[in-house]
Image (spheres, helix red, strand yellow):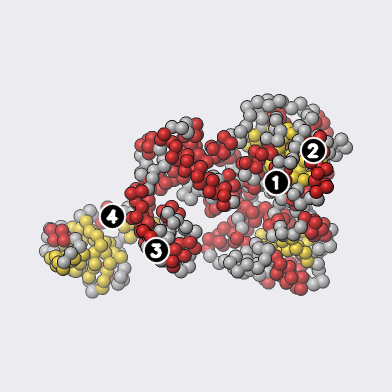
Amino acid sequence: MDLHDKSFHFSAKRIEALQRLHIYDSDDLLSYYPYRFDTISSSPISEWKIKEKVTFEAEVISRAITFRNGRFASTKFEVMHEDTVLKITIFNRPWASKLAMNSRITITGIYMGNHKVTAMNYDTKPLHDHEAVTPVYSTKEGIQQRTIRASIKTVYEVLQNEIIDYVPEEMIRKYHLLRRSEAYRKIHFPESLEDTKQAFRTLKYEEFLRFFIAMELNKDEEGLLSYKQPKNIDITKVKTMISCLPFSLTKDQVDTLNAIINDMRSNVPMYRLVQGDVGCGKTVVAAFSMYACFLSGYQSALLAPTEILAKQHLASLKSMIKDPSISIEVLYSAMNTKEKKDILRRCEEGDIDILIGTHALIQDDVHFKKLGYVVADEQQRFGVEQRKALRLKGENTDFLLMSATPIPRTLAASLFSDMKVSTIETMPAGRKQPLTQLILENSFRSVLDEVNALLEEGHQLYVICAAVDENEAFKARDVNKMYINLSKLFYPRKVGMLHGQMSSDEKQSVMDAFAKNEIQILVSTTVVEVGMNVVNATGMIIYDADRFGLSQLHQLRGRIQRGNAVGKCWLLTDNKSEDVKERLNVLVKTTNGFEISYEDLRLRGPGDILGTRQSGVPDLILGNLYEDTKMIEVCRKDAKLIVEHCDQTDYISIIESVKQRRAQSAYID
Ligand code: ADP
Ligand code: MG
């Protein structure tokens, strides 16, 4: 329900505060879970502060007297605690008069000074059975904990009888889960830590179940065939071509390529994921597998997320596959109409063997004569529907996905249970890693000498900004302004700029100039994240680094380690919060892509890493893919069962609810 709903009586100011926490409706609020719980234990009376909440066990030493004033009652009595007599007042609990002399009770209340306590609660359980638990929510400046707590309380009280259980009865009973309404109560208003544990278990189960149902639904829609025409591949020709490379393949590259070729030769359509860190050499593997496909008489398509990467692939494929009889072309939306028409015609006639392209490849006007193989590079940038659209342009298509955010094999195997997974772990021999430094200031003043030295040596520099134009709301350094400033600062060196709003020709001429070192400093958005390959550019400054994901930053710095000179990357931010520092320091400490995606997954949820967000798979708030292995196994199986028997009455509501959320999130994208 909308936060403006009258039954909540929220002020405009309250709603504005909640929206700043990305809470827009009652569901968001109820699933705004505490990130920790403070337990109140009893502290000695000498340490009590006025207005502080206190909990203590004491002996009743006077008869309780109740005063009434209309419907209002206050009860007063005395207790002995630590040899001190405390005067207790409790409102609207007239039954407190029945407290027996000398009985021991545990009181929670507010200390009013002068040995007076206004009790909120009391009972006869001993103190050690009590854990007064206070949920603590993550918040932003100017929004108090109690505002969040009060808002959740209001919404919960209004809605508690309307909270629907989506988890099927069968599972609730089997795993002794709580009702959702109960789980919300126990997580937001816990009486003990045990409450919070039960609540987390229930909510986490539902979260993983939804996650895997969404994954399962996507899988269905991949619409894979169970049979295809096997491809006939002359492997010696592939090997000969590989031997012409100026380097030899790593063992993981060879193994991966062999696995792909075996898949192509089989009669089951390939559905394989190749994952490996930036620079591990996935393109080479893709290139020779496409060459193998060409040898078997089929066309291949290579899907890339950006025009820059598509063009880069064209150049590297042409340099690696030196077979005069193969025709490799590129297609992207900004191409001129005549060229495009020509490519489309030749592709349809089967005159092009490998067609590389951006989203333009997916359009209806693209037809292949005999498409047998589709490779999606940086697969997390594409939605399931887009990949499928391309694959269905052929009849016997094998399908390869490539990802630069690798996760451990076992996790990959359980997440992508429908795919075969190849992991390239080893880096090419002699590969260096860039040095990274975190600068807690959104300016590179303090490294200017280092930057100048780098330019002095004849190397080039990238300067990355999070925005193109100045934007009040976004408040990040922008490409336009930075371009003007740096042009002055570094005069007479040449500065160029690059961003997605430029025309294709403009972009191309800037990139060419940078590649030829006619430009020494390139101010750019993340359009250079993948695909730029300028060996001489060894420095990178990233403004507002806290605005990017770790994996994205890691990809970006991959640009400055294309050759032998050690790259230098400076991450700038003036966000001094501990979280941000901790997160960015991961990049300073490690260049291992597995560790980086682990941190990203832990901190940002799986959407960015697995590319599942585009396909409407909900993100995990409570669950952790690395740690909750047992629950993952259980939920994966349950999700499968539910989707397979989707017309069973008990399963309908959760499936519908997942589908609805997917539709919404697809819409937001
Ligand atoms: P990514 O996995 O990030 O797509 P690329 O395929 O673009 O990596 O490879 C990065 C660079 O490493 C390229 O310049 C490529 O030519 C080079 N490379 C790939 N494999 C090897 C290897 N086995 N030995 C040496 N260099 C290699
Ligand atoms: Mg790549």
- The numbered disc on residue 92 is none
Frontmost residue, 604 versus 564: 604
- Which residue type does callout 2 highlight? Cys
Query: Horizontal and vertical percent for residue 134?
Result: 36, 59
- Which residue type does callout 4 highlight? His
Frontmost residue, 656 versus 475: 656
- Which residue type does callout 3 highlight? Phe
- The numbered disc on residue 347 is 2
The residue lying at 81 percent from left, 44 percent from top is: 341
Query: Horizontal and vertical percent for residue 422?
Result: 65, 37
Tell me which numbered mark, 2 or 3, is placed earlier along the sequence.
3
**Which circle, 4 or 1, is nearer the viewer?**
1
Report how many numbered discs are placed on residues in the image: 4
Q: Is residue 580 left or right of residue 376?
A: left
Report crowding for label 3: few under 14, some 14 to 19, many 20 or more residues within 10 A (C-alpha). some
| Labels 4 & 1 near each other (Cβ < 8 A) | no
Position of residue 162 relative to residue 65, above or below, is above
| Labels 3 & 4 near each other (Cβ < 8 A) | no
Residue matched to label 4: 130
Report crowding for label 2: few under 14, some 14 to 19, many 20 or more residues within 10 A (C-alpha). many
Residue matched to label 3: 10
Rounded to the nearest angstrom, the CA distance separating label 1 from label 3 is 45 Å
- Name the element at disc 2: helix
- Which residue type does callout 1 highlight? His
Where is the N terminus found, in terms of image quarters? Answer: bottom left
Tell me which numbered mark, 4 or 2, is placed earlier along the sequence.
4
Determine if residue 641 is in view: no
The residue lying at 76 percent from left, 68 percent from top is: 452
- Name the element at disc 3: loop
Query: Horizontal and vertical percent for residue 98?
Result: 13, 58
Rounded to the nearest angstrom, the CA distance separating label 2 from label 1 is 16 Å
Residue matched to label 1: 359
